[in-house]
């Protein structure tokens, strides 16, 4: 799998040099940034830590970066790590009491779902600053596009490739670390894992923070690429469900699984957009929900897992 990832990375890095049409550049950028968020979710989801609130961390990171640029003139190159750090801090505030109080399984998923909705409601409520439900646009700076991280499709393509490769490297490193073994033991039986010296809360906190950080990174870069922020598309249940769907559809137990799932999700989203347009606003979440159930029932290890089993 690591060889396939390296080969795919080389192909993606070279594609813009062959005059790829801008529409396909757009789809590729959206896919890679979505894959970063899906890979981040899979880092904790594969160990039984199911979150339906990763949209909260994305919303915090994206709005932090945009607000610092619009109101303080702080370049997004600094605002992005600041936003990711705030997203990870929010994940820590949410996860630590849950792990200490043994809030696990479905209850933890419900807590994260509520957190995502709280962040979305706060963004809407602070409409004088965030633009509320109408959204906001980062201030354009054509004279200093590099500092404003307004790189165009070709510039964002290579940035997306670099961030995607970083996410895969992190997944590969975690998969081969002792933490992965510890988290696997914790997912089987927390009490038994603690009895042999595994620090349960620390291990779960570490993987949660890493997961939230990558989700925030991919989501915030996606908002910066589109130059438009909206609470529904960044912090609502829709984006959280899309991340979960991408990770499960592709296969969260494989390094390239979330990437395949992200590509499938973007292709499905474009198909629904062309097919329904504005005629059926709730089409995407409905289809994601139905397909998510079908994948859980019939392809629990995702598309990549199915191919690996056949091979």
Image (tube, rainbow, N blue to C red):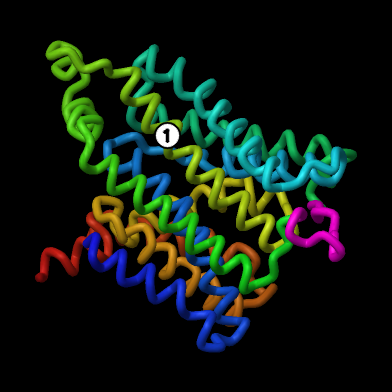
Q: Main secondary structure of the magenta part?
A: loop
Residue 171 image point, x, y percent: 32, 47
Q: Is residue 265 above or below residue 70?
A: below
- Quarter of the image with the N terminus is bottom left
Of residues 6 and 48, the one drawn nearer to the viewer in this rendering: 6
Q: Which residues are magenta?
A: 135-148
Residue 274 image point, x, y percent: 60, 81
Judge left or right: residue 86 versus residue 53.
right
Q: According to the image, label 1 marks what residue?
A: 109
Judge left or right: residue 15 versus residue 67.
left
Q: Is residue 64 above or below residue 189?
A: below
Q: Quadrant of residue 47?
A: top left
Q: Is residue 271 above or below residue 56?
A: below
Residue 32 image point, x, y percent: 48, 63
Residue 107 image point, x, y percent: 40, 27
Of residues 58 and 281, the one drawn nearer to the viewer in this rendering: 58
The residue that appears at 41% across and 50% down in the rendered structure is: 167
Q: Residue furthest right?
A: 128
The residue that appears at 82% across and 35% down in the rendered structure is: 126
The residue that appears at 41% across and 28% down in the rendered structure is: 108
- Tag 1: Cα neighbours inside 10 Å, few (<14), some, or many (≥20)? some
The residue that appears at 62% across and 49% down in the rendered structure is: 220
Q: Quadrant of residue 61?
A: top right
- Element assignment for label 1: helix
Of residues 40 and 154, the one drawn nearer to the viewer in this rendering: 154
Residue 95 on the magenta span: no
Judge left or right: residue 303 versus residue 148.
left
């Amino acid at each position: 799998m690591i060889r396939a990832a390296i080969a795919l990375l080389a192909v993606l890095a070279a594609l813009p040099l062959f005059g790829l049409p801008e529409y396909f550049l757009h789809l590729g950028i959206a896919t890679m940034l979505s894959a970063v968020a899906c890979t981040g979710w899979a880092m904790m989801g594969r160990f039984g830590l199911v979150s339906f609130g990763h949209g909260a961390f994305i919303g915090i990171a994206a709005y932090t970066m945009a607000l610092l640029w619009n109101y303080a003139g702080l370049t997004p190159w600094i605002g992005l790590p600041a936003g990711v750090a705030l997203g990870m801090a929010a994940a820590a505030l949410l996860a630590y009491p849950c792990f200490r109080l043994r809030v696990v399984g479905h209850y933890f998923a419900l807590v994260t779902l509520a957190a995502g909705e709280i962040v979305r409601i706060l963004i809407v409520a602070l409409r004088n600053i965030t633009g509320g439900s109408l959204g906001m646009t980062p201030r354009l700076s054509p004279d200093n596009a590099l500092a404003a991280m307004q790189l165009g499709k070709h510039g964002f393509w290579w940035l997306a490739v670099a961030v995607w490769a970083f996410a895969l490297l992190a997944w590969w490193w975690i998969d081969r670390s002792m933490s992965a073994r510890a988290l696997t033991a914790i997912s089987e039986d927390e009490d038994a894992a603690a009895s042999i010296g595994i620090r349960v809360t620390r291990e779960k906190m570490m993987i949660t923070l890493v997961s939230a950080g990558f989700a925030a990174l991919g989501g915030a870069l996606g908002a910066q690429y589109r130059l438009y922020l909206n609470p529904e598309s960044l912090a609502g249940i829709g984006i959280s469900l899309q991340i979960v769907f991408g990770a499960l559809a592709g296969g969260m137990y494989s390094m390239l699984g979330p990437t395949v799932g992200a590509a499938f999700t973007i292709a499905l989203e474009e198909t629904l957009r062309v097919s329904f347009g504005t005629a059926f606003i709730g089409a995407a979440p409905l289809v994601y929900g139905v397909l998510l159930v079908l994948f859980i029932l019939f392809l629990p290890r995702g598309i990549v897992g199915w191919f690996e089993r056949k091979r």
